[in-house]
């Protein structure tokens, strides 16, 4: 492989609001740079996990290298680095951006700028990326490219009048985008003879190669045999292979030098050693300092994850172990619940991350799970001066030992068309939001700014936002910090026994409402027993709500003759299977479904 | 011959009109279909037997009394040719009020039928209408007296509880009216609304669960006044008049079923014929290898057999004899079910009576809850 001139490399990413066509544009770029024939193209080449395809979002950032023969006659290497679109993965986005020199901003010609567009663009600009806009979906009847161009200039303040007008879906204007990449995105710099300094923007565990580190070489050169070291984790290894990214495959090469994007394998066993944002250097000739911006990933949302069948506990442990190999943001530790038995308290970046992990455990590892209500990390200041980071409500110390508690607060930006401002403000008030201000983007749209407690938005805030704005509101948030708050632990008692897996932390003003709803929901979920079962919600020993499951009166099949026996037996088998999947609390059997149903408390009936 | 005796069930899938709650394989017929069906029945009877002893026969439906009486005779003749029907054989037929006359009843007697089961369901004409029955209460009484006149001395009357429009009071009136006629046997089923029946999609005014149980408990008390004893969840009889054919099912004894949708149980295998009349009529029953008219075939494992013996046996008030269990399976009931028995005796749903185990009154209300525990999952 001949040496690649830095001036012929373009490292870039695409930023967009969800559904504005980022993945489709990426597909077109890959397709039209001739790397793949149309036949080889799957609908979305970059997203290679099934799950991503189904949800239409990109979970993990990935990269692809293509070759483009430009109008100036030169052959350019494009390294397209895909970034996750969801706010849960903000940090990963920022690291992917740091690996780029420029960004394409895709804006929907009909919908214009959304909250997430802004968040991502500002993030790109913060990383000193050159951003050029592209107006997508211009073939939609509702497209208004001129309005969107003006909006981009007004709101973001970048030149937009000559933005390519394209339809990624129908392949319109792609050539123009490719030329713009060559002309508007700067070539990388960096000295290939300097000490190695490479940024990790992703990593992947492969059972044959070990961890595959995705990186952007800033300075120096890395090749087979180099002893590398991760500067933050201190992990050390000998390089086995370096290479670049084909579409969906790895293409080995001689070396990676300054300006290049590629991968390194070095028989590393765990992605924990190759944290996103860390700097790879040459152990024998280290660079002076690591690249800026490395953060240890922190879990924001916690919940208990239990196997539906207690005997599957070792399987769950193995599955989590394997998932963690690939997902440094996932963490877990064993815990025991009186109601649910042995399981794990797992930490996630956010609710979406939680849902994805849960689905992967169920789908890829064939596990049936019971999860408890997700919660955030509270800070408990004890009277003796100790500060506890509380991730499991059951571990809350006795109220007499608590001086005060703090909860995480986020600053949220909500973009909404003016007709829905009222209902969105109402929603934010209900969720204990603190109004910070409002900017009009244009006559019909405004950007609302609120401070909201994280625990009020992790359940269903996004759904509520969408339903109250008929899908028009968009939302983005950033962790602001911790604030003191009047929090209480809400306990659920079934037949007068506390069910630990159903306890959660809630603000004292919303405790009654939540308690009532939970009791109602559980009443429908817990089957009748031989005796009457009271279901109660309690705060600090005081009952605040109650429902009753009446005693079983009748469970009979009146008729049963020769032809009915098989059917009758199946019915009884089902009943017995059902009993097997119940969780015994005291002398009450609670179906697993009941633990899950309380997660969806705010569904409007 | 010391071979085990068999029971025989013959399904007649014909009726005047389908009732709104009916989940059985049944429908109106033509003379031609009746002839074809009976021809198939005869062939099916022929191919199955080698002279077994038969001591119970049950002709069910549908409404078997809508079958041409001469055709029915052909079937019974074939049965007698093929099997060894013992002289004291119980031979029942289901009839509906208004579908028989004196002549037909006399012919039934002559061909050996000695027990009638009359589908009355209710004495309240409004309830009968709501169920979609073809008869009223008066027609029933006429049929009943006609049957006595023809010499039938073993008659069952079917009643239904929990039907639309019913109250505990209207049910009691029906029940007393029937008991006063003094049939030998009364069955009382509570309505189950099955998927696929017209009732399933209708807005029905049904008694509540509480009322249903009230009715159930009342049934036993009222019938006791008239000299009936409950011997199964839904069945009551004068002493010695229990239905022997049905007891065979509840004791997991062997039986053969002929006709569409009929089930058989023999040598640890249970199988069921197709529920599709066309397929049954099209089967080449002369061919010994023909098996296209079977629908399900289940080879019962040891565990299946234990479980079925328990949950079927518990339906009967006499319960299950420990001795019978041990003789049948060569292992004691306690060894298999010790924990379950103990648990439900503790919570008052089962009780010991001499050498047997049976449901308590409370246990009968929620029998499925108890029975499910006798299922042995893999």
Image (tube, rainbow, N blue to C red):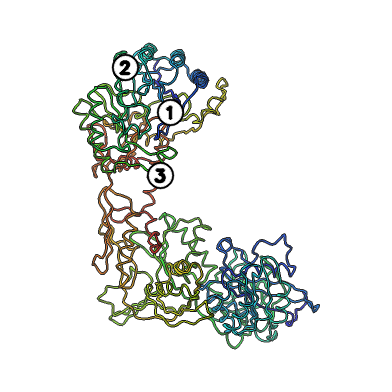
Q: Disc 3 sits on a residue from what chain?
A: A
Numbered circle sitting on residue A5: none
Mark 2 lies on a secondary structure that is helix
Residue behind mark 2: B147
User: Of discs 3 and 1, which sits in the foreground?
Assistant: 1
Residue nearest the viewer, comparing B248 with B259: B259
- Relative height, residue B20 to residue A553 (above, below): above
User: Of discs 1 and 2, which sits in the foreground?
Assistant: 1
The reply, left or right, for residue B353 in relation to residue A279 is left
Numbered circle sitting on residue A574: 3
Q: Position of residue B368 (x, y in %)?
A: 33, 40
Sort mark 1 into few (<14), some (14-19) or many (20+) by Cα contacts within 10 Å: some
Q: Disc 1 sits on a residue from what chain?
A: B
Sort mark 2 into few (<14), some (14-19) or many (20+) by Cα contacts within 10 Å: many
* C-alpha distance separating marks 3 and 1: 34 Å
* Residue A479 found in image quarter: bottom left
Residue appearing at x 30%, y 65% in the figure: A491
Mark 1 lies on a secondary structure that is loop
Numbered circle sitting on residue B17: 1
Sort mark 3 into few (<14), some (14-19) or many (20+) by Cα contacts within 10 Å: some
Counting residues from the N terminus, which is met first, the one under dot 1 or under dot 2? 1
Q: Are marks 3 and 1 on the same chain?
A: no
Q: Disc 2 sits on a residue from what chain?
A: B
């Amino acid at each position: 492989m001949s040496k690649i001139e830095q001036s012929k490399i373009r490292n870039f990413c695409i930023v967009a609001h969800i559904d504005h066509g980022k993945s489709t544009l990426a597909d077109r770029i890959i397709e039209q740079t001739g790397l793949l024939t149309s036949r080889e193209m799957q609908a979305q080449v970059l997203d290679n996990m099934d799950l991503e395809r189904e949800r239409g979002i990109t979970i993990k950032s990935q990269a692809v290298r293509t070759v483009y023969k430009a109008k100036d006659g030169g052959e350019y290497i494009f390294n397209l680095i895909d970034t996750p679109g969801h706010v849960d993965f903000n940090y990963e986005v920022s690291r992917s951006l740091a690996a780029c020199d420029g960004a394409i901003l895709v804006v929907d010609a009909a919908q214009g700028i959304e909250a997430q567009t802004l968040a991502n663009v500002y993030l790109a600009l913060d990383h000193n990326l050159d951003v050029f806009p592209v107006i997508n979906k211009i073939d939609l009847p509702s497209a208004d490219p001129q309005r969107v161009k003006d909006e981009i200039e007004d709101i973001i303040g970048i030149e937009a009048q000559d933005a390519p007008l394209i339809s990624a879906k129908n392949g319109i204007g792609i050539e123009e985008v490719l030329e713009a990449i060559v002309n508007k995105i700067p070539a990388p710099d960096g000295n290939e003879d300097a000490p190695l300094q490479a940024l990790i923007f992703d990593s992947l565990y492969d059972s044959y190669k070990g961890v595959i580190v995705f990186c952007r070489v800033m300075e120096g050169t890395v090749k087979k045999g180099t002893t590398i070291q991760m500067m933050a984790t201190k992990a050390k290894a000998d390089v086995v292979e370096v290479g670049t990214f084909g579409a969906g495959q790895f293409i080995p090469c001689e070396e990676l030098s300054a300006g290049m994007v590629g991968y390194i394998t070095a028989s590393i066993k765990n992605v924990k050693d190759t944290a996103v944002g860390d700097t790879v250097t040459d152990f024998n000739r280290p660079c002076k300092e690591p690249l800026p911006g490395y953060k240890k990933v922190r879990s924001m949302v916690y919940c208990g994850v239990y196997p539906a069948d207690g005997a599957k506990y070792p399987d769950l442990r193995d599955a989590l172990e394997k998932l963690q190999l690939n997902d440094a943001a996932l963490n877990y530790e064993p815990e025991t619940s009186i109601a649910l038995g042995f399981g794990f308290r797992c930490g996630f970046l956010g609710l979406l991350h939680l849902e994805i992990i849960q689905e992967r455990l169920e789908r890829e590892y064939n596990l049936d799970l019971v999860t408890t209500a997700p919660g955030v990390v509270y800070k408990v200041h004890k009277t003796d001066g100790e500060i506890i980071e509380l991730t499991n409500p059951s571990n809350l110390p006795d109220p007499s030992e608590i001086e005060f508690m703090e909860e995480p607060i986020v600053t949220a930006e909500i973009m909404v068309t003016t007709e829905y401002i009222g209902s969105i403000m109402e929603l934010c008030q209900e969720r204990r939001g603190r109004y910070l201000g409002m900017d009009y983007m244009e006559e019909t749209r405004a950007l609302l700014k609120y401070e909201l407690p994280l625990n009020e938005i992790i359940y269903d805030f996004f759904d509520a936002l969408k339903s109250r704005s008929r899908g028009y509101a968009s939302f983005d948030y950033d962790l602001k910090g911790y604030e003191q708050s009047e929090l209480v632990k809400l306990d659920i008692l079934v037949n007068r026994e506390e069910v630990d897996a159903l306890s959660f932390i809630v603000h004292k003003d919303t405790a009654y409402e939540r308690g009532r709803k939970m009791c109602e929901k559980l009443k429908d979920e817990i089957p009748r027993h031989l005796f009457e079962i009271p279901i109660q919600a309690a705060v600090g020993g005081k009952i605040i709500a109650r429902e009753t499951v009446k005693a079983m009166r009748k469970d009979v099949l009146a008729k049963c003759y020769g032809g009915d026996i098989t059917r009758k037996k199946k019915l009884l088998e089902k009943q017995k299977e059902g009993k097997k999947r119940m969780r015994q609390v005291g002398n009450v059997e609670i179906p697993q479904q009941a633990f899950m149903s309380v997660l969806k408390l705010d569904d409007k009936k | 011959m010391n071979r085990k005796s068999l029971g025989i069930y013959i399904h007649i899938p014909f009726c005047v009109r389908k009732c709104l709650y009916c989940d059985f394989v049944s429908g109106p017929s033509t003379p031609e279909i009746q002839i074809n069906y009976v021809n198939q029945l005869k062939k099916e009877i022929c191919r199955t037997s080698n002279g077994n002893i038969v001591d119970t026969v049950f002709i069910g439906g549908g409404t078997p009394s809508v079958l041409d009486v001469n055709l029915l005779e052909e079937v019974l003749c074939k049965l007698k040719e093929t099997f060894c029907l013992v002289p004291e054989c119980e031979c029942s037929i289901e009839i509906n009020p208004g579908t028989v006359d004196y002549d037909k009843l006399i012919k039934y007697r002559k061909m050996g039928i000695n027990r009638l089961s009359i589908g009355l369901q209710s004495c309240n004409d409004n309830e009968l209408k709501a169920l979609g029955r073809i008869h009223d209460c008066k027609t029933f009484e006429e049929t009943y007296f006609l049957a006595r006149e023809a010499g039938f001395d073993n008659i069952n009357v079917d009643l239904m509880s929990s039907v639309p429009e019913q109250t505990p009071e209207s049910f009691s009136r029906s029940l007393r009216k029937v008991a006063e006629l003094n049939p030998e046997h009364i069955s009382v089923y509570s309505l189950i609304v099955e998927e696929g029946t017209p009732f399933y999609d209708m807005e029905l005014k049904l008694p509540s669960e509480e009322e249903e149980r009230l009715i159930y408990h009342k049934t036993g008390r009222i019938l006791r006044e008239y000299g009936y004893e409950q011997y199964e969840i839904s069945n009551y009889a004068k002493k010695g008049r229990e239905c022997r054919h049905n007891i065979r099912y509840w004791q997991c004894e062997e039986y053969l079923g002929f006709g569409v949708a009929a089930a058989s149980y023999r040598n640890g295998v249970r199988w069921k014929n197709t529920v599709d009349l066309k397929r049954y009529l099209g089967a080449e029953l002369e061919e010994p290898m023909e098996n296209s008219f079977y629908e399900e075939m289940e080879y019962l494992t040891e565990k299946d057999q234990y479980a079925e013996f328990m949950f079927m046996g518990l339906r009967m008030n006499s319960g299950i004899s420990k001795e019978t269990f041990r003789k049948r399976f060569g292992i004691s009931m306690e060894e298999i079910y010790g924990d379950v028995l103990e648990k439900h005796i503790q919570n008052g749903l089962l009780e010991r009576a001499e050498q047997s185990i049976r449901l308590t009154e409370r246990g009968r209300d929620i029998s499925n809850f108890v029975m499910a525990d006798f299922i042995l999952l893999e």
